[in-house]
Image (tube, rainbow, N blue to C red):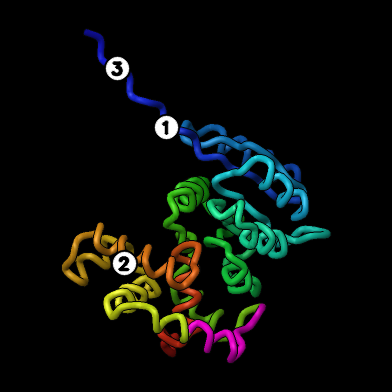
Amino acid sequence: MEDTPSPVPTPIRVLLADDQALLRSAFKVLVDSEPDMRVIGEASDGAQAFELARTTRPDVVLMDIRMPGTDGLAATRLITADPELADVRVVMLTTFEVDEYVAAALRAGASGFLGKGAEPEELLNAIRVAAAGDALLSPAATKGLIATFLAQGGGAGTTPATGAAHAQRLAALTGREREVLVLVAAGLSNDGIARRLEVSPLTVKTHVNRAMSKLGARDRAQLVVIAYESGLVRPRAE
């Protein structure tokens, strides 16, 4: 009796959004060279990126933060606000890791950000991490950088009303869920949190998912934003 062949995993569907055609071409060659992902569309501005996201339903959008017309930040807000695109993850591409729009991008619903100078493997890893729903930050970024931007109000800024609203939602969390949220905001992975709390990674994943559901967060990046904006976690002075 012949062995039944294993099902071939569905490739990660990637949408590229950048106003530079040469850069899009380079990204496309890189992404399409991987067996587990493929480019399913290219956009030269944010408006086109949003329309393509609606028609092609990518798993991940690599979104340049600065584009003429509708920029990446506005496009990200459109994507993350559309209930039909709830499963689409956006990774922002920035010229510099230290970018004044990074915090605003995370608040807009981006799953993370990556500098355009990142190594190819970093870009590919970011796509895989985002597609898995575990997106947080690019490998070159640190929790300290995000903490700094949130403390400074980077871009959009946090109003007292926003902080109060987050604090009110935190009341719905159990004590363990709040504990896990603090550790997520500290940059720990599920495995790291499991070791810290001496529980299984599956238990941690359950707590993280429940916290995301109660707080209306799309992914871990949004949990980090909420943790800081609500005052549950405060940046430590360097």
Q: Which residues are magenta?
A: 156-166
Residue 217 in the image: state x and y as whole percent: 49, 67
Amino acid at dot 3: Thr
Judging by the rendered image, the residue that carries numbered circle 1 is 9
Dot 3 or dot 2, earlier in sequence: 3
Which of 153 and 175 lies nearest the eye of the viewer? 175
Sequence-earlier tag: 2 or 1: 1
Please state which of residues 80 and 147 is positioned toward the viewer in this rendering: 80
Q: Identify residue for label 2.
A: 207
The residue drawn where x is 40% and y is 84% is 171
Is residue 229 depicted above or below 113 in this figure? below
- Amino acid marked by disc 1: Pro
For residue 189, which quarter of the picture?
bottom left
Label 2, label 1: how far apart the Cα atoms are: 28 Å
Q: Residue at x 76, y 58 (%)?
A: 67
Sort mark 3 into few (<14), some (14-19) or many (20+) by Cα contacts within 10 Å: few
Residue for badge 3:
4
- Outermost residue toward the right? 69
Residue at 58%, 91% in the rendered image: 160
Verify whether residue 163 appears in magenta. yes
Q: Locate the N terminus by quadrant.
A: top left
Q: Is residue 71 above or below residue 20?
A: below
Q: CA distance from mark 3 to mark 1?
A: 15 Å
Residue 19: x, y in percent?
76, 50
